[in-house]
Amino acid sequence: MNPYYMITAAFVISSLTAVLSRKLSYGLAALSSAALLALITTGTPGVDDLTRYFLLISGVVWLGASLFSLSYDDHYPRLLAGAFSMAMAGMMVILLAGDAVSFLIGWETMTIASYLGITAKEKSGKGAYKFLAFGELSALLILAGFGMMIIQSGSIEFSAWKATPAWSIAFLLAALGFAVKMAVFPFHTWLPNAHGNAPANLSAQLSAVLTLMALYGMLRLLLIGTPADWVGAVFLLLGGLTAVLGASYAAGTEHVKRLPGYSTVENDGVLLAVLGGAIVAVGHGISALASFAFLALLFYAFAHSVAKGLLFLIAGRLENGSGSFSEVVPGRLGMVGVAAGYVSALSLAGVPPFPGFLGEWMGIETLLQSFRVPDVALKILMLLVGALVALTAGIAGVAMSKMITHGAQKGGGKKGLSAEDAGYAFMTAVLLLTGILPVLLLRTVSGIVGSLGGMKAAEFIGGALGIRDGFLIVSKDFGGISPTYLAVLLFLFAVSAYILLRITVMKSVRHVRPWSGGLANGEYPAVAHSAILLITESWLYGTEEKEGRIGWHERVGTAYERLGRAYLSLSERFRHGLMRGSDSVYVAYILLALMAALTYLLLAL
């Protein structure tokens, strides 16, 4: 029997044991995740390279979240533990599926199990319902795309599908379904609410792995055939808008768990934009750019998933009361948790030597190589999207500085160690190892990159300081600066600036009141990090200032709410106008229906 199927069965058993004991369920989930990582690292056959890589990412997050859950989940219903493991089983089915039916069964299992897990937390009804509603929209769009592919090929097996003249339309339909699950604009409004209201261990799984299943689905289809350039252009546009919106809202929010939720929107936007650039490069036969784009995509997916999963675990432990940063209290995190908060936030902010820095650099490098694309319109679009992605990197720094100073740093002080610290330590170690020795990860995707783009990842792997046969990456055939050089230069500039300040300015100390971003507060509050953005970009935030306080609302979410209210009002009027509760009216409807049927028959004759 395929050992990976056995791991899937183990997750199902873990889910069922939640009836007996939450800790036993999480313990089995942790053992199953560790066994999965052992299978992957030893090269056990049974899956292809693409599946193996996404199983690796999933296994890292699952193991860290399962260890965390052993000491976190002591007050939620047992439904949470069962849903937690069942969602893992659903994702295993997705990754192991060789046909459309199995894939969709896994997709629905993952969605429904996650929905049930979200409902385990009080007052999560609206967020859970939005999660389920958008999840079913996602499934319907994927079903429509898969249906077209099945009709064209006459088979449900992925291996029998081939790119046909209608492939681009079918691909786009399925990809839109995947995009909904990735919370791509304008479908992004459900994610911060749902993931922000979910229990912390499930939030880590949802944002770090569940949305990743959508990227896997797109790459699985790309192995079958590449769609037309205009599909890549759609991805570029949606990805760029999603990234900048997600980063902006992450910087503006004052909610501990919605911040990483919006950050997930940003990261998924970057992934979609880079994927769009890769499709354009493949379509024009630029194998070097296409392969580097896929390498950037896969590396960024790993860096984002592990860091985001870890950050959600930290945020869930910090969450208190209404979830505002102002309500974070000391003693929620120990030294390991505080260090993990720093590492995850710094990686997501794109600070070296953490993997998020390398992932962002590679993504931006890809998009700014647009001059290699002969089509002028696509060239300009890639350049503009590259500029947006570069902008998101700066805005993300604002959000993560808030997460560090008013989250991890403020919530420290806890004494002793617990199982959650083991989860923190494991995922932190993975991030540090990946940041310092990224070649360990880059070489694992060499075959995937070759299949998708035409050149293996080994063609881009250079050495220390961008020389040869070492452990860091350089861009071959394009790009003049390796991230290694950039990291060293940043370090040297920082040390030089510090020494200069110590010699000159810092000799005398002047005490002043803290600046609060232009607000009247006597201390530096969390909102001060983003006050300038909220005030200067009020067209985006819908900023409102009342009695010295500043607030905002998401305009797209408000538009959805207004649309929903308009629909309810219209349906109510329609109901009252059509269904009056009068027998004579109903008889008239029957007569009209009969007359219409008779007219149709007469015309047919």
Image (spheres, helix red, strand yellow):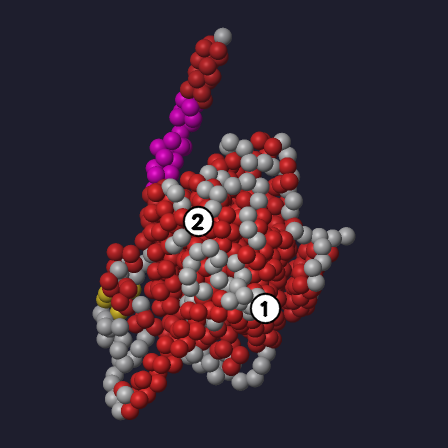
Asked whether residue 585 is drawn in magenta, I would say yes
Q: Nearer the viewer, residue 211 or 561?
A: 211
Q: Which residue is painted at 49% across and 54% down in the image?
A: 292
Which type of secondary structure does the marked residue at label 1 adopt? Answer: helix
**Dot 2 amino acid type:** Gly
Taking 412 as reference, is 593 above or below it?
A: above
- The CA distance from mark 1 to mark 2 is 32 Å
- Other-residue count near label 2 (Cα within 10 Å), few / some / many at <14 / 14–19 / ≥20: many
Q: Please state which of the two labelled residues, at mark 1 or mark 2, is closer to the viewer.
A: 2
Taking 499 as reference, is 381 above or below it?
A: above
Q: Which residue is painted at 38% across and 63% down in the image?
A: 393
Q: Which residues are magenta?
A: 569-589
Identify the residue under disc 2: 277
Q: Nearer the viewer, residue 53 or 284?
A: 284
Q: Which residue is painted at 63% across and 56% down in the image?
A: 52
Taking 407 as reference, is 12 above or below it?
A: above
Q: Earlier in the sequence, mark 1 or mark 2?
A: 1
Query: Is 359 placed left or right of 471 in the picture?
Result: left
Residue 106 x, y percent position in the rendering: 61, 49
Identify the residue under disc 1: 64
Q: Main structural element of the magenta stretch: helix, strand or loop?
A: helix
* Label annotation for residue 363: none
Query: Is 517 placed left or right of 365 in the picture?
Result: left
Asked whether residue 261 is drawn in magenta, I would say no
Is residue 497 visible in the rendered image? The answer is: yes
Which type of secondary structure does the marked residue at label 2 adopt? Answer: helix
Q: Which residue is painted at 40% across and 53% down in the image?
A: 369
Query: Is 107 placed left or right of 47 in the picture?
Result: left
**Dot 1 amino acid type:** Gly
Residue 77 x, y percent position in the rendering: 58, 64
- Other-residue count near label 1 (Cα within 10 Å), few / some / many at <14 / 14–19 / ≥20: many
Residue 443 x, y percent position in the rendering: 59, 60
